[in-house]
Amino acid sequence: MARTLFLTALVALLSGFGGAALWSLSGLGDSQVRQYLVANPDILPEMAEAFEQQQSAKRLADVGDDVTRAFPGAVLGNPQGTVTLVEFTDYGCTYCRTSLPHVEQLIAANPQLKVVIREWPIFQGSEEAARMALAAAKQGKYTAFHNAMFIQGPPNPARVEAAARSAGLDLAAARAYAVSPEVDVEIAQNRALADQLGFTGTPSWVAGGQTLVGAVGPESLQRAIDQAKGT
């Protein structure tokens, strides 16, 4: 839908005042512009994709290294990996749950892959799970809690506690840390980063100088990882 709206706006722009200004550089008039677009409609999706990539690159440049700098311990895969995939996730998100095996597949296929998880609770009841996940990271048990929480299903207090017990957390220490200023700052920062990057839902991804949104599948994520590798 977003791309359709963009293409509609692009046609209007190129065919209207903006188009006259743009195409005057080549000496083409409005009617010639229209004729060219009708004769070459395939150029519009290409222009839309190029524009989206340009905007994505600009937003990533604006946030800098903040998006790839992990909360201590909130990492899957190789913590010292040389290639980074960032996932904005929510334990109440069905698409995040279906993406979990894809991430595991990518980790197995890419020994140097570091997956930085940004806890972004946007669904009702998810914030408690996100806070407990960061508490698990503090105790060095992030992966165990992360996987257990998705197995439990949509988060509620009982399921969060069950996942914490399954991960072997010190529950008293975890509960105290979950409401600490450090966790407050991390969740607020993740929300701000998601907003800056133009994300509207989970899962959302950053890799190889590009952003992806949704359960895009392991093939698309692998292509982004390959781009990050420079291969």
Image (tube, rainbow, N blue to C red):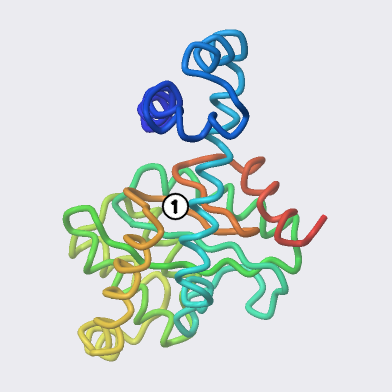
x, y percent for residue 34 = 50, 13
Q: Residues within 10 Å of mark 1 (few under 14, many from 20)?
A: many
Assign a secondary structure to mark 1: strand
Left or right: where 18 falls relative to 38: left
In the rendered image, the quadrant that contains the N terminus is top left
Q: Is residue 155 above or below residue 118?
A: above
In the rendered image, the quadrant that contains the C terminus is bottom right
- Who's the residue at 42% across and 50% down the image? 203
x, y percent for residue 51 = 52, 42
Q: Name which quarter of the figure residue 208 lies in.
A: bottom right
Left or right: where 69 falls relative to 82: left
Residue type at the position of mark 1: Ser
The residue that mark 1 highlights is 204
Q: Name which quarter of the figure residue 132 lies in.
A: bottom left
- Who's the residue at 58% across and 34% down the image? 25
Residue 41 versus residue 56: which sits nearer the camera? 41
Left or right: where 179 falls relative to 167: left
Residue 169 versus residue 26: which sits nearer the camera? 26
Q: Is residue 210 above or below residue 162?
A: above
x, y percent for residue 96 = 42, 49
x, y percent for residue 223 = 70, 46
